[in-house]
Amino acid sequence: MQGLMQDWPLLCHRIIDHAAIQHGARPVISRSVEGPIHTTDYATIRKRALQVAQRLEKDGIRQGDRVATLAWNTWRHLESWYGIMGLGAIYHTINPRLFQDQIVWIANHAEDRLMLADLTFVPLLERIADKLPSIERYVILTDAAHMPATTLRNAVPYESWIAEADGDFAWRSFDENTAAGMCYTSGTTGNPKGVVYSHRSNVLHSMIAALPDSMGVASRDVIMPVVPMFHANCWGLALTSPMVGAALVMPGPKLDGASVYELLNDYRVSFTAAVPTVWLMLLQHLEASNLKLPYLKRVVIGGSACPRAMTQKFQDVYGVEVIHAWGMTEMSPLGSLCSLKPEYADLSGEARLDIQNKQGHPPFGVEMKITDDSGRELPWDGKTFGRLKVRGPSVTRAYFKEDGPGILDEQGFFDTGDVATMDPYGYMQITDRSKDVIKSGGEWISSIELENLAVGHPKVAEAAVIGVPHPKWDERPLLVIVLKKGETAAKDEILGFMQDKIAKWWMPDDVVFVEEIPHTATGKILKTALRDRFKDHVLPTAEAAE
Ligand code: ADP
């Protein structure tokens, strides 16, 4: 027997419809690429998204076509997403921080037909446009007054382009499993891989993201997604915010500490999210200028491990609750968030930080297991490391155009490439990426744990730990440090600080000080580059062993 409920497909444009009806006047404030602050609302965003859909159709874009965006977080980018999805086409966000060759590869692989790009990226696109034959038109996200002279094919300013559509248009209807969006993983090894979100997965993911133990957002919130829309589906915030009717503050191209602070303060942002590097810049700015964060209540920190010292500073000095989160592009992207279940809710001080250091527990819609290399499940004792595997309605089951062997195990779980522990209350803690874990004498050392510890030293700005070859132990940890501006420190000072806080055999065998640590396009430490740079580094312990 079938249920007798209505067939109401989970389509993303229903989200902007709901926002326009229920929260139509809620402000959407952006720092525009042109410079000034721009204010609009959900009702207007929906109206203009309808114009985008209608105008795209006029340009020959049809259901299933990929429309690329190379853009910062602004109201125009948001309208574009809804316009593209409402037509049944697919928004394909491209990360402008990738190497040019990667951008070319990705746009060609996706066979993007049209590209919406910010003014910032016109020079970049002009350099590579002759290698992008599938793109028939470039729409520059600006108005006629700011439109530069450009050689880009059929280039038009966005405002003039959508003005050619009156918005008298109905969203197209289709199956909820229709593709809605696309995002490529950075692919630190091999070519980038295309992850394809569906309307259904995006809608479900938005609901999962809004849950009280996830991001817990509501119409009373003012949300600032500092995480770019081109990074892992904007962590769901471009869909969750209108779904719950929260006001939005979009930071545009300026993500430095002073600019982020200005928006947090001027627009009374209550909730924000980004990678640790962004918060490092903000905290440095706050300290240098002796500022406070009176309006901000919660900050989601993920994308790479949130250092304990960062959680502590946000909470103890600024009164802002940190929600540590873990996820991946392949998971839409949320996998776990570290809210406190009743079992941990009464903890305080260091014991509370111990829990917040974990990446958290999966919400409904994400199932997890840890296994050994042969696929055997490992216990949830908070100590045993294993490969972290996940499944759920917003977890990828295949990559775009990859027909090789499947990426799921027999039970339908996807191997995240991360190594983690699970504790008895279901909290997951990443110990490493499987390729970054340091294998010393057959045992594993977590590079993340050592990094977290080292950045707790007051003179350390950033730390990375890599395994370097060792004649006796295979690999031993090397600690790479960037000191805070104007600081000097000796090796022993740093190692002394770490002593007694970790097992003796986890202690790094050497410390090197560098000016800068290289990062990936999504702000993670680029371990491959560090390993390459230090591949011939001779550890003091190696000499002794020989
Ligand atoms: P990209 O490699 O393009 O940045 P993702 O954003 O999808 O792609 O990266 C996902 C990976 O980032 C995860 O598999 C994990 O290794 C790492 N990661 C994400 N959040 C955290 C976190 N809170 N702590 C540690 N690692 C994290």
Image (cartoon, rainbow, N blue to C red):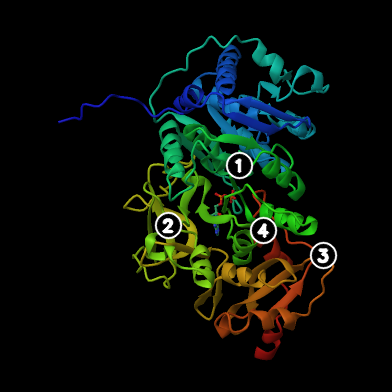
Type of amino acid under label 3: Lys
Residue at left 46%, top 30%? 179
Of the 4 image quadrants, the one containing the N terminus is top left
The answer for how far apart the CA atoms under marks 2 and 4 are is: 27 Å
Circle nearer the viewer, 4 or 1: 1
Residue that badge 1 annotates: 225
Q: Does residue 546 appear anywhere in the picture?
A: no
Judging by the rendered image, the residue that carries numbered circle 3 is 485
Callout 1, which amino acid?
Answer: Pro
| Dot 4 crowding, Cα within 10 Å, few <14, some 14–19, many 20+ | some
Give the quadrant of ligand 1. Answer: bottom right
Please give the name of the residue rendered at 59% of the width and 11% of the height, measured from the top-left corner. 58
Callout 1 touching callout 3 (CB < 8 Å): no
Q: Earlier in the sequence, mark 2 or mark 3?
A: 2
> Tag 1 or tag 4, which sits nearer the N-term?
1
Q: Which mark is residue 526?
A: 4
Residue 443, placed above or below residue 124? below
Q: Residues within 10 Å of mark 1 (few under 14, many from 20)?
A: many
Ligand 1 has an atom within 8 Å of the beta carbon of the residue at disc 1: no
For the residues labelled 4 and 1, the Cα–Cα distance comes to 24 Å
The reply to whether dot 1 and dot 2 touch (C-beta < 8 Å) is no
Near-viewer residue (77 or 514): 77
Picture coordinates of residue 493, whole percent (x, y): 73, 81
The residue at which mark 2 appears reads as 361
Tag 4, which secondary structure?
Answer: loop
Q: Amino acid at mark 4?
A: Leu
Residue 484 visible here: yes
Q: CA distance from mark 1 to mark 3?
A: 28 Å
